[in-house]
Amino acid sequence: MSMIERIRTRRDANRRARAIEHALRSANSPAVREELLAIAQRHIS
């Protein structure tokens, strides 16, 4: 894996993590939060 690919992968992962955190903060119901966590788990693994 080249240096550029590694940087791009890390940047994408950071962007996704920030988006998930933002969505969790703005989610006002526990059901929505649970769904977001399930989606996040799917992306991480």
Image (tube, rainbow, N blue to C red):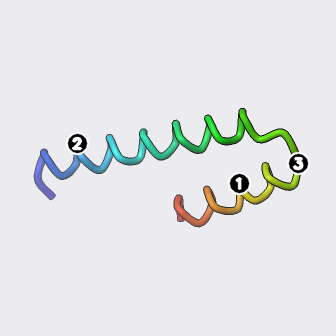
Residue depicted at 61% across the width and 56% down the height: 40
Task: Decide: few, some or many residues near mark 2? Use Cα within 10 Å; few <14, some 14-19, many ≥20.
Answer: few
The answer to whether the residue labelled 2 contacts the one labelled 1, judged by CB atoms less than 8 Å apart, is no
Tell me the number on the disc at residue 7: 2
Q: Amino acid under label 1?
A: Leu
Task: Decide: few, some or many residues near mark 3? Use Cα within 10 Å; few <14, some 14-19, many ≥20.
Answer: few
Residue depicted at 29% across the width and 50% down the height: 9
Q: Position of residue 43 (x, y in %)?
A: 53, 62
Residue 45 as seen in the image, left or right of residue 24? left
Tell me the number on the disc at residue 30: 3
Q: Nearer the viewer, mark 3 or mark 1?
A: 3
Q: Give the CA separation, mark 2 to mark 1.
A: 25 Å
Q: Residue furthest right?
A: 30
Of the numbered discs 3 and 1, the one sitting upstream in the chain is: 3
Q: Is residue 18 above or below residue 43?
A: above
Residue depicted at 79% across the width and 49% down the height: 33
Q: Give the CA separation, mark 3 to mark 1.
A: 10 Å
Of the numbered discs 2 and 1, the one sitting upstream in the chain is: 2
Q: Which of 3/35 is in front?
A: 35
Q: Position of residue 11 (x, y in %)?
A: 32, 41
**SS of the residue at dot 1?**
helix
Q: Position of residue 36 (x, y in %)?
A: 70, 54
The answer to whether the residue labelled 3 contacts the one labelled 2, judged by CB atoms less than 8 Å apart, is no
Q: Which residue in the protein does label 1 denote?
A: 37
Tell me the number on the disc at residue 14: none
Of the numbered discs 3 and 2, the one sitting upstream in the chain is: 2
